[in-house]
Amino acid sequence: TGGPFDLRRVSDALFDTDWQAAGPARFPLPQRHWLPDTQVLVTRAAAGSERGLLLAAKGGHNDESHNHNDVGTCIVAVDARPLLIDVGVGTYRKETFGPERYGIWSMTSAYHNVPVVNGLGQPPGAAFRATDVIHRHHPDGDELTCDIAAAYPPEAGLTRWQRTFRLVRGTDDEERVEIGEAWSCCAAPDALALHLLVAGAVVLPGGGGRAVVAPPTGRGLSMHWDAEAFTASVEEIPLTDRAFTRVWGPAVHRLVLTARAPAAEGGHTLTVRPDSGRD
């Protein structure tokens, strides 16, 4: 007794006539919500509407409740369908709650929308965190800025990695999400990559610098980057766990943007727009 499934709690729900009579309620869909304690921003194109882009981004640290190593990650949805995703948690097993937790792929930063520097991702622990976290609201959008350098081990060689997530509201042509990077390292890294986990088929049109994420129905996402600075590759990640397949289907994909010439200091902006499939 006393747990979430004890008989008293079930009985309260079954015999609460006011709750039964109320019927289903529609979520209010606020335009933005900022949670300063957890450093999470959720912002959408228009209040009360599922249409358009939604951005969820976080700072935080790597010892949160039900933690994933994902400081500085984000999710982008279009028309209420997540396409730049966090795959979530698989079926619970003993490793989920023990020291082997971070041997589970979906818990690691390699499968979240964060950088990999010198081949290194983010370790677990409260010391690995975002700093200088700032949320700003503008008339035409919202943004979250954080420095995620402290989320990486010293071997990554980072002195600063500022990420800026920005949702820009406007007409269909103006609406977009921007993911900005500005980094400084002790020395030029041997390797630097940006990982992007996506749901849906991924197409890399000729010419470079663009990927289209196409769901089975509805609008997709068009992602744009500097093709002179980054190459792109796509990896399929087959899914067999029912907890994943019932949400995402048989597979998700990881888009990897790899720096052609990693520099000790640099910057980049990835732009994400709704895609109707007409281009």
Image: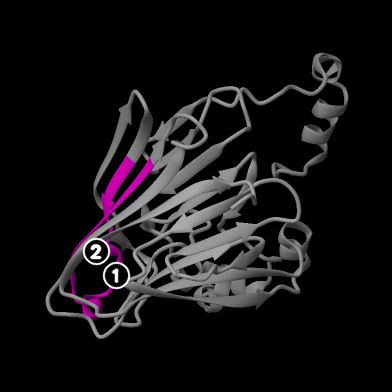
Q: Residues within 10 Å of mark 2 (few under 14, many from 20)?
A: many
Q: Which residue is mark 1?
A: 152
Point 54% across, 23% down: residue: 47
- The reply to whether residue 186 is visible in this rendering is yes
Give the left or right position of residue 3, taking residue 260 as reference: right
Separation of disc 1 and disc 2 at Cα? 6 Å
Q: Residues within 10 Å of mark 1 (few under 14, many from 20)?
A: many
The reply to whether dot 1 and dot 2 touch (C-beta < 8 Å) is yes
User: Residue 145 in magenta?
Assistant: yes
Q: Which residue is mark 2?
A: 149
Point 53% across, 26% down: residue: 46
Mark seen at residue 129: none
Point 78% across, 42% down: residue: 6
State whether residue 51 is above or below residue 70: above
- Measured as percent of width and height from the top left, residue 86 is found at 56, 58
- Measured as percent of width and height from the top left, residue 213 is found at 60, 59
Secondary structure of residue under mark 2: helix
Q: Amino acid at mark 1?
A: Tyr
Secondary structure of residue under mark 1: loop
Of 1 and 94, nearer the camera is 94
- Measured as percent of width and height from the top left, residue 221 is found at 56, 52
Give the left or right position of residue 176, taking residue 200 as reference: left
- The reply to whether residue 87 is visible in this rendering is no
Query: What range of the chain is rendered magenta?
Result: 144-166
Q: Amino acid at mark 2?
A: Ala
- Measured as percent of width and height from the top left, residue 70 is found at 43, 61
Give the left or right position of residue 157, taking residue 250 as reference: left
